[in-house]
Image: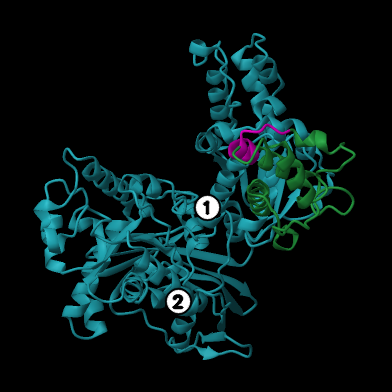
Amino acid sequence: MTDKRERVLKSIFGAIEEINEMLAEEERLNCSEDTLLSGSAGELDSLGLINFMVALEGRVSEDFGLTLNLIEELENPEEPMKSVRCLADFIASRVDGDGA
Amino acid sequence: MSLDADKILLLSDFNLGGFTGYLKNALKVLPVQAPYGQVIHTLLDENSEYWNDSYSSALVWTRPDGVIDSFRRALDFHGFEIETVLTEVDRYAQALSKLAERVPVLMLPSWTLPVSMSGYGMLDLRRGTGIADLLSRMNLRLAENLEKFPNVYILNAGRWMQMAGREAFNPKLWYMGKIAFGNEVFKSAVADIKSTLAGISGDAKKIIFVDLDDTLWGGIVGDDGWKSLRLGGHDPTGEAFADFQRVLKSLTRRGIVLAIVSKNEEGTCWEAIQNHPEMILKKEDFSAWRINWEDKAKNIIEILGELNLGAQSAVFIDDNPIERERVRTALPEVLVPDWPQDKMLYATALSELTCFNTPQISEEDIQRSRMYREEGQRKDLQQSLGTLDEWLNTLDIKVTAEPLSDGNLQRATQLLNKTNQMNLRTRRLTENELVEWERGENHHLWVFRVQDKFGDSGLTGMISLERQGNVARVVDFLLSCRVMGRCVEETLFFVAIEFARSLNLEKIYVDYHPTEKNKPCLRFLESSGFESGDKDQEFVVDIKKPYPQPDCVELVMPEA
């Protein structure tokens, strides 16, 4: 795993922890690459997903200086929002170089 | 209606988003959320499904432009007449008043402007032109309309916005989810709601335990000497400590009691407190202290016992994380806030604590610190005297019984809702509910003021009876912990028993309802000489048996 991807995962897990504060204990997401986010098997409801996307966009902007508009990616046929793993791959591909 | 029902009704004209989740996690209540955007419809619809349930409280959070149409137009820089806008506010308040009559507690976050809204700039606070001016008037008008409902609390949402800063509004949350505020605002709101409900339930904090070295002043007094302490003067750190003391002192004016627990030599510390020219807090500001080398948790327990306060009413402030952890572990009910390492943040950290908020501030609250100081003097006297009876006889205790009246209703309700320890049934009622109960057939209620040679403790007791044929049942028996153990308990029963005797009743039944906190009441009943009843924890007073008025108490009864 590259350093860049690890840093992206850290941002995603930070956003998950932020969202978990507003979820009941049994609804909280695992900080794991296997966690499913959107789609029929996604663990977040629509409001949770909105909060997650906003939290993550803020973190990615702060950590990598990258502006994302994740709501548009919900329509992306490659489904980058499907799981934490897909999302980490997607964001890592958008971040320029390891030093970003 | 009981305050311990478990549902809170949420009405809003926007999507509350993460707020509901934060609320559910912070409070043991189930939020019931009406669909957003239907506030006025829900308030006015007598047949709404939401009225089929009962709620311990309700929260109505609206944006001013969401419910006041003329204000929405004003935001778009249409001209406006102040009176037209305020008339619309009156109508909205009228709709809210219906909800105020349905729920025990109604909370309304005040109206705020979007943080990005600059309005008319330098004219924005000009009467008749400015949007900010108009909104201030609307908030005031709303508050004036609702001030006749003591169960309505308008929460200062402006503070939540200030604390959140630019995070107060997130356009993405708004456009994607119609969520009007950022999550930092919601977190502050939940903290305030939690402290509001805690205050109403009688769980507001009443006492602060403070350490001395590097907490109340900079430096180690035992090592450095009082002349070298950093406090006040032309020194930023010294000024920060002085400000922290100022905030503590201001809390004593709201009735919060101060106590010292410090590992130090007592004489050295008092020398510093008395002699340092910049010392804001004086010896008389502290109601109790343990300045010794013993375990702080043990010292706190001793002081709480001395002042008849529970651990749940205490806050402990200490710069030393080890001491904080010790108290947090030994006394989990004591609030031990994480304390900033930076001394310059002490005053802010203290000001940000919302745990002292109470639903009313009565004269008794303001005088509480003085009363506890007097209680300390009484204890001193107790230690210097022989038996308890001898001590009680020296106190010149006077107990005055009164019927419930407009003049004492607020304090009587506060007492009913705040008293935990000497409380037979821990019944919680609003002012209206108490009046309604007292007016009921065969219901009798007295409240009691207590004073002694050290001072006036104010209205601190209540007993009420319900007659049932030739017997009566005690409905409320409660006494503030400030006056416990001075034969006032017996005096309250004496009044009730004499009344029953005058009506030729045969017995009074006393049903003890246990809670986590009212063991002192059970101990009193067990030692009262009353017979045990048929039911568990039921006591029976035989009216034929003598029950004398305590010798040490002068009783003043209301004129017939």
Residue hosting label 2: B493
Q: Earlier in the sequence, mark 2 or mark 1?
A: 1
In the rendered image of this protein, does residue B240 appear above or below residue B471?
A: above
| Residue B364 falls in image quadrant | bottom left
A60 is within the stretch colored magenta:
yes
Say which chain tag 2 marks.
B
Q: Quick check: B177 left or right of B211? A: right
User: Marks 2 and 1: same chain?
Assistant: yes
Which residues, given as a range, are shown in magenta? A58-68
User: Residue farthest to the top?
Assistant: B79
Dividing the image into 4 quarters, which one contains the C terminus of chain B? Answer: bottom left
- For badge 2, the amino acid type reads Phe
Residue depicted at x 37% and y 71%: B308
Say which chain tag 1 marks.
B
Residue hosting label 1: B195
Display colour for chain B: cyan
Q: Which mark is residue B359?
A: none
